[in-house]
Image (cartoon, grey):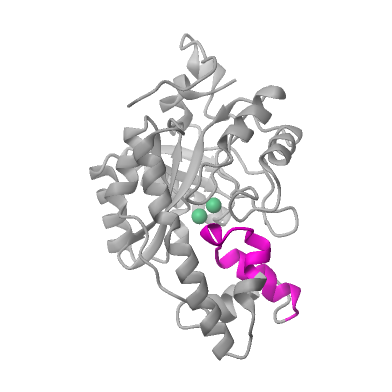
Amino acid sequence: MHAPCAASTVPASDPQETWPVGLNADLHCHSVVSDGTLTPDELARRALGNGVQLWSLTDHDEVGGQAQAAQAARSIGLPFLTGVEVSVTFADATVHIVGLGFDDTDAQLLQGLYATRGGRDGRAREMAQGLAQAGIPGTFEGALKYAGNPELISRSHFARYLVEIGICSDIPEVFRRYLTEGKPGYVPHRWATLRNCVRWIRDAGGVAVIAHPGRYGFNPTLEYALFSEFIAHGGQGVEVVTGSHFAHEYPKYADMAREFGLAASRGSDFHSPHESRVDLGALPPLPSDLEPVWHLLQAHIRQ
Ligand SMILES: [Zn+2]
Ligand SMILES: [Zn+2]
């Protein structure tokens, strides 16, 4: 079931030189296939224009944009890794795991993502009910207009609609006032388990990476548990430099990568030219003593 990745691969002769730790890799972003506003094609061109040297598209729970992303990247000479960002429930919180360099036709992975996406429609309807009770009707339809497909609807789509109709002035304000725990549009949801998610990615030949660990608000005990269990299930990487962290958090997660022996990843988490704090390719490089996650994935890079 480990079908080899299509297209040519990089010779493994001088990997450190070809893919150094200081590479401008951007291995986390979103397209219109999930909650981004650009197409895979537009993202590939934007990445190249911004100096990205290795790129991955990581839509939420969906690999429907991978073929177009791979094709777009190849046509402009941009090395590409397949990607996905899977929603996982861990310790009653939602944690994101990025998968990189897997076979995007693997049946078990596709089935797992399909089941994970299945929860979004019902959750979105509950969120809309909560918002209607708070005096904001019609948000399911409003969010759906942005998502296009109820299977892919997410909090970001609700946020865009609430900004559009003038309830809030920007996306962070919507999350703060309406979409986080204890607020009217918040609906807890059970996603994939950490164990299943890591297994889907690994069995499909890829590497699993903890996305933006600083965003979960875990205390040190829970954070330690997340890292330990992730590794026990076969996880191999962690995002150290990410657009979803502040710069002062980079050293902390560089230390966690060293302590746990995890490879380091780097990605902007870019969603939209108008909404994202960090553009594709605009982050500082990884600390030079870390092992970059792309060293585990050389044979999977499409170019
Ligand atoms: Zn995320
Ligand atoms: Zn993301």
Q: Is residue 70 magenta?
A: no
Q: Give percent across and percent down for residue 213.
A: 43, 55
Residue beneath the point at 43% across and 32% down:
102
**In the rendered image, is residue 172 in sight?**
no
**In the rendered image, is residue 17 in sight?**
yes
Residue beneath the point at 53% across and 45% down:
241
In this picture, is 71 found above or below 86?
Answer: above
Q: Give percent across and percent down for residue 180.
A: 50, 75
Q: Based on the displayed image, in which of its 4 quarters is residue 90 positioned?
A: bottom left
Q: Which residues are magenta?
A: 143-166
Compared across the picture, whether 72 is left or right of 241 comes to right
Point out the image quarter for the N terminus: top left
Q: Based on the displayed image, in which of its 4 quarters is residue 295 positioned?
A: top left
In this picture, is 12 found above or below 223?
Answer: above
User: 279 or 250: nearer the eye?
Assistant: 279
Q: Give percent across and percent down for residue 61.
A: 47, 50
